[in-house]
Amino acid sequence: MRYFRLMVDERVKNRVEPAAMSPLQVRDILADPQGQNQQEDPLFLAVHTSPQTVYPDFLEFPLPLVSDRMKSLLEKYMPGLEWRAVILTDFKQVKQDVYWLLRPPMEDCLSAQTEWYPNQTLKRLVLRQGALESPVFRIKGSIEPHIYIHLAVAESLLRRFFTGIRLQRVEMEA
């Protein structure tokens, strides 16, 4: 099996950038919702735009956000994915755009060959063979909120000309 890390394409210039958030805020937002009310409440993030601003289909920072179009494709692969509406708000131009916070399941799939930096961020990611069940997931035990996808999902994304997406192949255990 092949898996890829879903990343922002840095070549897209004038990409919309939501306001920065602390790692603690990100962790709390990405955590499983405690109740139905929290899941239904939209999250509002401030953005600054210009006439040249591009709204890509995927934003990685500060949270993994996807467009409506990308959300509908990912739901075909995983109907049970948890979503939370995120409203990107530009107060200066009085404009709002809806994105969706992607909260895939956490998978315990790290190989013993995975290497870490002293600050507990990933140095070299290696996934265990046969340890993955979800086509879209995050890694349990990693402090980084990266999204990983199966080859079939990656091919689907690339066939549909989504903007602002880059894929990085993940090493699998031999």
Image: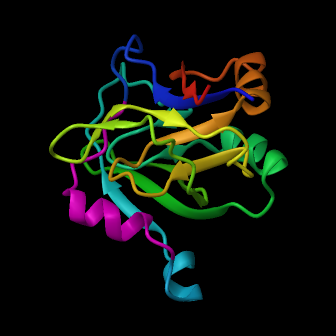
Give coordinates of residue 5: x percent, y percent.
53, 31
- Which residue is located at x 60 percent, y 56 percent? 104
Give coordinates of residue 110: x percent, y percent.
50, 45
Asked whether residue 90 is drawn in magenta, I would say: no
Q: Among all residues in the image, which is located at the extreme left?
A: 118
- Which residue is located at x 22 percent, y 55 percent? 21
Pick the residue in front: 167 or 8.
167
Give coordinates of residue 167: x percent, y percent.
55, 21
Quadrant position of the C terminus in the picture? top right
Is residue 56 among what the camera can see?
no
Is 82 positioned to the left or the right of 100 in the image? right
Q: Among all residues in the image, which is located at the extreme top?
A: 11
- Which residue is located at x 48 percent, y 69 percent? 42
Pick the residue in front: 102 or 151.
151
> In terms of image quadrants, where is residue 108?
bottom right
Is residue 147 among what the camera can see?
yes
Quadrant position of the N terminus in the picture? top right
Q: How is the image coloured?
A: rainbow
Asked whether residue 24 is drawn in magenta, I would say: yes
Is 55 positioned to the left or the right of 15 in the image? right
Q: In the rendered structure, which segment of residues is drawn in magenta?
A: 16-32
